[in-house]
Image (spheres, coloured by chain):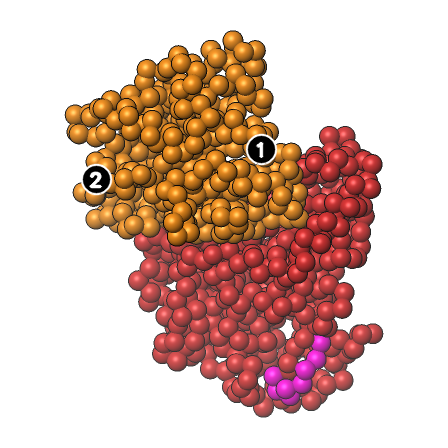
């Protein structure tokens, strides 16, 4: 798992061909600037240079002229070869220093005092394809960011002008020593991430939503925090939808419990979007799988996974006029499950759940009616007498895709509707700052929730002496 | 009565960092006042295992903070935040006289840090630890580029920081020995210097070339840096270790074209034929080979080869003519080179010439010859291959 830093390619793409001519251009324009000594070295730091994705970093520039307007710019080239960027406008202080964690950004893709704004406010560069979503496929290599400082307050033309200085930062989903194991066992497909050390570790069954496929990065990050986490594939985007069998998820849960490095009775479930439906159905109805706790992000208890396909098809036809589109033709699905059904066959009986449950929702979720669902879940649990197990976090101006922190907000992106194969741009909702706050706060709370319920051991109470 | 409490937690921060960065090792939720051993294990590129360990006692909350707490014994003791790295040594049973050196500077050192119950001093691999973490220690920061150089007959490795530049530069002259240690050069580039690690003892030679390079080789190397588009030509330093330091001193004073902004001499000496070439210097050392001593384990001591410090000016670099700041780094227990004696003599010469204000001497007690980047293990003696004769020496 040790790899050479893949930076040469990055720099050759951004400082392509004819490097000498570019530097001569730089020297020529710098000679024209009467405020700059061409031998002055502008120092730029980022710390840590190689951090985990959920770690904060500090970006600082020194040796600028005092009160100098500059633009801090962050550039990332995704695995899909798209370019993402973010930038903030700053002014150096009397000592010629800019500290992103302490200073205010006057504008750009973010404003105000935002130490991680250069990451969470990234968006595709102008001219990019529509509907992009930034997702990491190869979790054993880092995201590489080129962070540069430019003279003046720029909003475009970053590729044409040479920066004053640059640094490269890496953002990893996987800590050193985490083991990645492909799982194809008893019909279950997934990837298991085991933390370093002998264990045993608490376990997590990690599920993403209806877009399908095998998405590993959140599990890799959970393992970096000490959880043996399995990312599960349960929807293949290429397949026609069939009835979901609870047995598949029970087997996946068992595989985690059976692993020699997992504490059998300390396994939880974490789901996002449709993964929430799975989590709630298993927690409420499974006689075999007893999760120690459940985290449900941007999901609903409406239409449990055991709902037969024909019932779902009827509901789709009935509700087809509830699919809206916004002014950019992005598809809005949030009304599809409204009103929340009262038919017990179409709603998970959350009154049966016996483990702690954490719901994480954005109040601007345009894909699922998650806040209405959360309210109904609270009512049902109140009636059933298990409401003390429920914690609900609702974040203002956050959308559907509440992911690990400091990753860009995606308001809308490409989506293939499984049962019709239609390619649409799905509106997820939210706005950048509100969504960034939701991602940062909810991740901390999710980790604490998992630690509270899974990372516990028997200890002896202190003996009082009389 | 058993109650539920949080699980034992071992953390190391940063989990990926440069080798000269400090790490913070924390233990939480252990039993209170519990004896614990923190153990580090590293497998070198040659397949040798190195280890270090420290004994700690958790506080009343069951916590240990290696940066703050006192180590009660092990391969180091006392308040030593980085003891787990600098006290790494070959595990018992290893091949003799190993020296710690990273050849491939593009990949990290992988160090496993484990927590064991009780005060242990051996057999770590036979016991299951309570917890472990892995840290990566890098010489090369993200964005640093490595270029193999063969320009104008000069061979070496150029390291470039990320960004357009321009950057200050360093000509790095390593010590004697067969391979080209790049560790210091790549680390300097990780700190923003364009660095050329120059291969001057084993360069690629054209057919019929001379055995030792002449001074023009170094002049070409220096001008490669001066003319590089990403280098500030007026800001080039020379850093030399051991033999490289001796070369750096001589070239800075006598070369008409090599004018560094400053000089760093680590474990070096000014004793050499004044204005001489590399070949002249080797010839002079050979004359003094009879001064070689051996310790009780038959290890070679070359300390006296250059002693006594001559008073004849033609036998040492006239540092009184130096025009740039000079930093001398000296280990007072250097058994390989008379670095301490040379430093005193250089100080005297410079004070008499009136350029003593340019000199800074850092002299470290109980320190040997191989003063390398921080937090790497100490080697009291190691195998060495003579650059001229290609003989493998007994350990020193």
Judging from the image, mark 2 belongs to the subunit labelled B
**Quarter occupied by residue B65:** top left
The chain whose colour is red is A
Residue B237 visible, this angle: yes
Q: Residue at x 77, y 43 (%)?
A: A30
Q: Which residue is mark 1?
A: B257
**Quarter occupied by residue B71:** top left
Question: Is A58 placed above or below A243 here?
Answer: above
Specify whether residue A421 is painted magenta.
yes
Q: Residue at x 23, y 37 (%)?
A: B393
Mark 2 residue element: loop
Characterize the local packing of mark 2: few (<14), some (14-19) or many (20 or more) Cα atoms within 10 angstroms: few
Out of A31 and B65, give the one closest to the viewer. A31
Disc 2 or 1, which lies upstream in sequence? Answer: 2
Specify whether residue A208 is painted magenta.
no
Characterize the local packing of mark 1: few (<14), some (14-19) or many (20 or more) Cα atoms within 10 angstroms: some
Question: Is A173 placed above or below B363 here?
Answer: below
The stretch in magenta equals A418-425
Q: Where is residue A114 shown, x and y percent of the image?
A: 70, 46
Q: Where is residue A230 shown, x and y percent of the image?
A: 44, 66
- Residue A388 vs residue A155: left or right? left
Q: Residue at x 73, y 49 (%)?
A: A24
Q: Which residue is mark 2?
A: B96
The chain whose colour is orange is B
């Amino acid at each position: 798992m040790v790899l050479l830093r893949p930076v040469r390619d990055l720099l050759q793409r951004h400082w392509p061909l004819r490097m000498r001519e570019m530097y001569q251009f730089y020297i020529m324009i710098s000679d024209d600037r009467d405020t700059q000594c061409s031998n002055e070295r502008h120092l730029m730091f980022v710390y840590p240079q190689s951090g985990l994705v959920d770690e904060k970093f500090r970006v600082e520039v020194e040796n600028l002229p005092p009160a100098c307007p500059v633009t801090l710019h962050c550039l990332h080239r995704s695995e899909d070869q798209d370019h993402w960027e973010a930038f903030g406008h700053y002014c150096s202080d009397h000592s010629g220093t800019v500290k992103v964690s302490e200073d205010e950004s006057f504008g750009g893709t973010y404003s105000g005092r935002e130490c991680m704004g250069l990451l969470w406010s990234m968006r595709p560069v102008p001219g990019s394809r529509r509907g992009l979503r930034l997702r990491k496929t190869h979790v054993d290599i880092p995201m590489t960011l080129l962070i540069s400082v430019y003279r003046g307050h720029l909003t475009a033309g970053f590729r044409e002008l040479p920066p004053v200085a640059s640094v490269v930062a890496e953002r990893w989903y996987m800590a050193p020593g985490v083991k990645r194991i492909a799982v194809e066992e008893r019909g279950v497909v997934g990837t298991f991430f085991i933390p370093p050390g002998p264990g045993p570790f608490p376990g997590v069954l990690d599920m993403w939503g209806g877009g399908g496929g095998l998405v590993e990065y959140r599990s890799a990050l959970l393992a970096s925090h000490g959880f043996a986490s399995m990312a599960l594939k349960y929807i293949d985007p290429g397949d026609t939808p069939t009835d979901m069998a609870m047995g598949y998820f029970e087997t996946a849960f068992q595989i985690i419990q059976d692993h020699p490095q997992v504490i059998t009775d300390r396994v939880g479930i974490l789901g996002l979007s449709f993964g929430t439906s799975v989590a709630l159905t298993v927690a409420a109805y499974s006689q075999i799988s007893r999760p120690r706790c459940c985290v449900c992000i941007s999901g609903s208890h409406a239409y449990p996974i055991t709902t037969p396909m024909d019932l779902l098809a009827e509901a789709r036809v009935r509700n087809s006029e509830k699919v809206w589109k916004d002014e950019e033709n992005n598809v809005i699905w949030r009304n599809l499950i409204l009103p929340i059904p009262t038919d017990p066959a179409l709603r998970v009986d959350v009154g049966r759940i016996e483990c702690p449950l954490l719901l994480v929702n954005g109040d601007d979720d345009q894909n699922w009616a998650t806040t209405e669902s959360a309210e109904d879940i609270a009512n049902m649990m109140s009636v059933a007498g298990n409401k003390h197990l429920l914690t609900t976090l609702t974040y203002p101006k956050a959308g559907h895709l509440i992911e690990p922190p400091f990753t860009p907000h995606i308001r809308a992106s490409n989506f293939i509707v499984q049962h019709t194969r239609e390619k649409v741009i799905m509106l997820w909702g939210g706005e950048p700052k509100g969504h960034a706050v939701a991602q940062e706060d909810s991740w901390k709370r999710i980790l604490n929730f998992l630690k509270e319920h899974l990372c516990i051991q028997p200890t002896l109470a202190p003996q009082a002496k009389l | 009565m058993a109650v539920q409490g949080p699980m034992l937690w071992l953390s190391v921060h940063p989990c990926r960092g440069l080798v000269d960065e400090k790490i913070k090792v924390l233990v939480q939720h252990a039993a209170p006042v519990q004896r614990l051993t923190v153990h580090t294990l590293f497998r070198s590129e040659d397949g040798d295992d190195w280890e270090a360990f420290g004994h700690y006692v958790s506080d009343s909350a069951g916590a240990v903070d290696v940066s703050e707490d006192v180590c009660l014994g092990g391969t180091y003791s006392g308040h030593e935040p980085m003891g787990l790295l600098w006290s790494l040594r070959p595990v018992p049973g290893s091949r003799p006289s190993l020296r710690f050196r990273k050849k491939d500077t593009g990949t990290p050192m992988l160090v496993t840090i484990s927590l064991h119950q009780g005060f242990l001093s051996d057999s770590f691999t036979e016991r299951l630890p309570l917890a472990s973490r892995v840290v990566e220690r890098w010489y090369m920061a993200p964005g640093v580029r490595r270029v193999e150089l063969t320009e104008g007959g000069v061979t070496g490795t150029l390291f470039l920081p990320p960004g357009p530049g321009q950057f200050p530069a360093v000509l790095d002259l390593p010590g004697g020995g067969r391979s080209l240690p790049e560790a210091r050069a790549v680390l300097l580039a990780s700190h923003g210097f364009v660095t050329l690690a120059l291969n001057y003892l084993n360069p690629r030679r054209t057919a019929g070339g001379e055995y030792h390079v002449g001074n023009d080789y170094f002049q070409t190397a220096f001008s490669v840096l001066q003319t590089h588009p990403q280098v500030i030509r007026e800001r080039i330093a020379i850093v030399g270790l051991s033999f490289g330091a001796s070369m750096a001193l001589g070239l800075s004073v006598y070369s008409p074209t090599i004018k560094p902004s400053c000089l760093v001499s680590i474990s070096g000496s000014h004793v050499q034929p004044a204005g001489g070439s590399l070949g002249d210097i080797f010839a002079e050392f050979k004359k003094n080979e009879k001064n070689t001593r051996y310790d009780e384990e038959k290890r070679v001591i070359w300390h006296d080869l250059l002693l006594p410090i001559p008073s004849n000016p033609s036998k040492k670099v006239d540092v009184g003519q130096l025009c740039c700041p000079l930093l001398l780094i000296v280990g007072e227990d250097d058994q390989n080179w008379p670095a301490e004696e040379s430093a005193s003599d250089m100080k005297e010469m410079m004070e008499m010439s009136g350029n003593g204000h340019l000199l800074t001497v850092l002299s470290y007690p109980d320190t040997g010859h191989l003063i390398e980047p921080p937090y790497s293990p100490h080697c009291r003696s190691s195998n060495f291959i003579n650059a001229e004769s290609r003989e493998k020496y007994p350990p020193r």
